[in-house]
Image: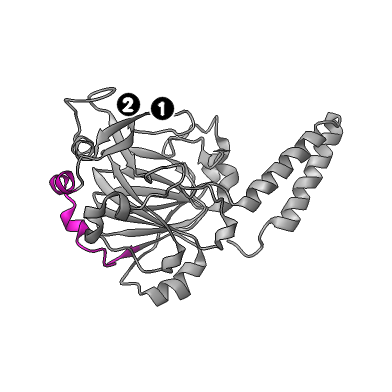
Amino acid sequence: MAWQRLPVPRLEGVSQDRFMQQLYPQRKPLVLEGIDLGACTSKWTVDYLSQVGGSKEVKIHVAAVAQMDFISKNFVYRTLPFDKLVQRAAEEKHEEFFISKDEKYYLRSLGEDPRKDVADIRKQFPLLEGDIKFPKFFKEEQFFSSVFRISSPGLQLWTHYDVMDNFLIQVTGKKRVVLFSPRDAQYLYLSGTKSEVLDIDNPDLTKYPLFSKARRYECSLKAGDVLFIPALWFHNVISEEFGVGVNVFWKHLPSECYDKTDTYGNKDLTAASRAAQILDRALKTLAELPEEYRDFYARRMVLHIQDKAYSKNLE
């Protein structure tokens, strides 16, 4: 396949000053090695998490296939005690199951009331708080959420973007992450914040012919690695083995830019949502025109948007 594959840079021993002054302003993904994450990378075994994490009920995704699709919802939501989830997710085959013996599990931790509260591992799993240290590469008042993620071996999450910057901390296990630049959004066949292209390694180019033009930025994460994912960068994650991760999201823009009802960090910025509503109204008005005129004025509007809104400073 002719797409362009680019490695995500890896840097070891990056200081807070270097990250903030030299690397962060570039707005590109970066794997950080050698960050002090605390004892979690050695302590968070299946047995330890099962014992210390407790039997609190958690809501999980359960899928019969490895490639999870949030658009078609090819999974079901179920609840399990946390210790049972950890044990099942670490298995290849299950004696107890919801759908099938080789079903896959995915935990994305939630706040106490997901409609109002953000996820914070320090609140939902307080006995684990002392084991992990978050990278001190943003101001404490910018903190938004810390999301506990547990995945079965082989599980692949759909390609999507978030509106906040985040660190993906790989605590245990291995992941492969493929990222796509926001500038390549037109090649990803979006439905909301998610790409319709589920199999990014063997895409149906008859159905998605432009997908091959999207540049792929790839990296493998091992225990102790931290991946910086800038806001709006699309990412697709495969758990190559049972693994535990923590995403730390923070607000790099003023708080008023974000949707106040957003507890996940993936609702479009309020100004962007307003602009999309205005565009929908404009399209309804264009629909009143005959096809020839509708096509002509739509093309003029696209050119006007490109001229006035497209950045000339981004790669």
Q: Residue at x 46, y 46 (%)?
A: 116
* Image x and y of residue 297, in percent: 83, 41
* Image x and y of residue 60, in percent: 33, 35
Q: Is residue 48 left or right of residue 244?
A: left
How many numbered callouts?
Answer: 2
Question: In this figure, which residue is indicated by the disc labeled 1?
Answer: 74
Under circle 2, the secondary element is: loop
Whether 278 is among the magenta residues is no
* Image x and y of residue 77, in percent: 36, 30
Q: Which numbered disc flags the more N-terminal residue, 1 or 2?
A: 2
Mark 1 → mark 2, Cα distance in angstroms: 8 Å
Instruction: Quadrant for residue 190, please give it.
Output: top right
Does residue 221 appear anywhere in the picture?
no
- In front of the other: 80 or 13: 80
| Relative to 57, residue 226 above or below | below
Q: Residue at x 77, y 34 (%)?
A: 284
Residue stretch in magenta: 32-52
Whether 49 is among the magenta residues is yes
The residue furthest top is: 99
Residue kind at label 1, given as amino acid type: Asn
Q: Is residue 276 left or right of residue 233?
A: right
Q: Is residue 113 left or right of residue 301?
A: left
Circles 1 and 2: CB distance less than 8 Å?
yes
Question: In this figure, which residue is indicated by the disc labeled 2?
Answer: 64
Residue kind at label 2, given as amino acid type: Ala
* Image x and y of residue 46, in percent: 16, 45
Instruction: Quadrant for residue 112, please give it.
Output: top left
